[in-house]
Image (cartoon, rainbow, N blue to C red):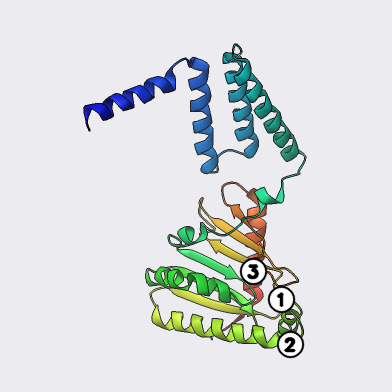
């Protein structure tokens, strides 16, 4: 590092702290600490918003001599107060609840040792994540899969999702999924792969990763009655979502107990 770089860094640090009283640093450190706890799922959204409101109030007190800063802080406080009130009244906006994509699923999958999947055909799941599932089987992971029985009544129900004549589409997709899982089971005997079939049409898709651990995840995909490129998805966390997490996990286990094994 050159002398010029050192001078620039010292100048930046000096400008960061210049004119900031203890209330500034208390607010910053509190926000960072609560933010980390929220990421780890150890505190609720109410605690996070409450800490932010408290920190901003503290900053507003320290900035009382600066009218412009105080006006900006007042606007932020009003907005956050509105969001906190909205949350308490159960009015969480859909954009905050549903995921735009399962962007973090691949990363979570890459470390999972217990994988449970439920869907109509799961063909898109295998297209996007088949290689990673194979890698997990190679290192001894357990994978349990529930799909629609191609010989059951659910096939005709699935055909209603699309225009008339698409029942064959689901039959073909199921054939591909069954062939792929058979190949995985044969090639990666180190792991444990089981597939079971349900006669009725599943109303949702579940992608469950390490559910019995503190970092467990359940991705819930809601099927639509019309063809959509991506269905709405939300994610439940083992540490955060309590009985909702347990309820969706129980849905999978209940179906698993009654489903028919694909292989003897």
Could you tell me if residue 150 is visible in this image?
no
Outermost residue on the left side: it is 2
Provide residue 175's location: percent of width, then percent of height: 58, 86
Tell which circle, 2 or 3, labels the residue nearer the N-terminal end.
2
Horizontally, is 111 left or right of 208 in the view?
left
Looking at the rendered image, the quarter that the N terminus falls into is top left
Q: CA distance from mark 2 to mark 3?
A: 19 Å
Which residue is label 1 attached to?
201
Locate residue 185: give its quadrant.
bottom left
Could you tell me if residue 178 is visible in this image?
yes
Looking at the rendered image, the quarter that the C terminus falls into is bottom right
Viewer-side residue, 142 vs 69: 69
Which residue is label 3 attached to?
229
Which residue is label 2 attached to?
165
Horizontally, is 126 left or right of 90 in the view?
left
Locate residue 4: give its quadrant.
top left
Provide residue 136's location: percent of width, then percent of height: 42, 68
Q: Residue at x 77, y 39 (%)?
A: 89
């Amino acid at each position: 590092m050159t002398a010029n770089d050192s001078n620039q860094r010292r100048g930046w640090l000096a400008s960061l702290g210049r004119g900031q009283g203890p209330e500034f640093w208390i607010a910053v450190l509190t926000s960072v600490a609560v933010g980390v706890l929220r990421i780890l799922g150890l505190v609720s959204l109410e605690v996070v918003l409450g800490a932010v409101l408290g920190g901003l109030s503290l900053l507003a007190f320290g900035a009382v001599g600066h009218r412009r800063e105080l006006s900006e802080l007042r606007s932020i406080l009003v907005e956050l107060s509105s969001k906190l009130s909205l949350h308490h009244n159960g009015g969480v906006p859909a954009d905050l609840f549903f995921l735009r994509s399962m962007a973090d699923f691949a990363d979570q999958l890459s470390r999972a040792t217990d994988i449970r999947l439920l869907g109509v055909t799961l063909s898109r799941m295998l297209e996007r994540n088949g290689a990673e599932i194979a890698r997990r089987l190679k290192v001894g992971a357990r994978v349990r899969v529930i799909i629609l029985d191609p010989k059951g009544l659910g096939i005709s129900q699935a055909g209603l999702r699309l225009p008339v004549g698409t029942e064959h589409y689901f039959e073909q997709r199921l054939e591909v999924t069954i062939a792929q899982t058979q190949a995985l089971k044969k090639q990666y005997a180190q792991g444990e792969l089981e597939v079971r079939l349900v006669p009725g049409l599943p109303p949702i898709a579940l992608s469950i990763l390490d559910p019995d651990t503190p970092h467990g995840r359940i991705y819930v995909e809601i099927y639509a009655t019309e063809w959509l490129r991506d269905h709405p998805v939300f994610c439940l966390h083992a540490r955060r979502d309590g009985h909702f997490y347990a309820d969706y996990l129980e849905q999978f286990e209940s179906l698993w107990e009654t489903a028919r094994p694909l292989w003897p």
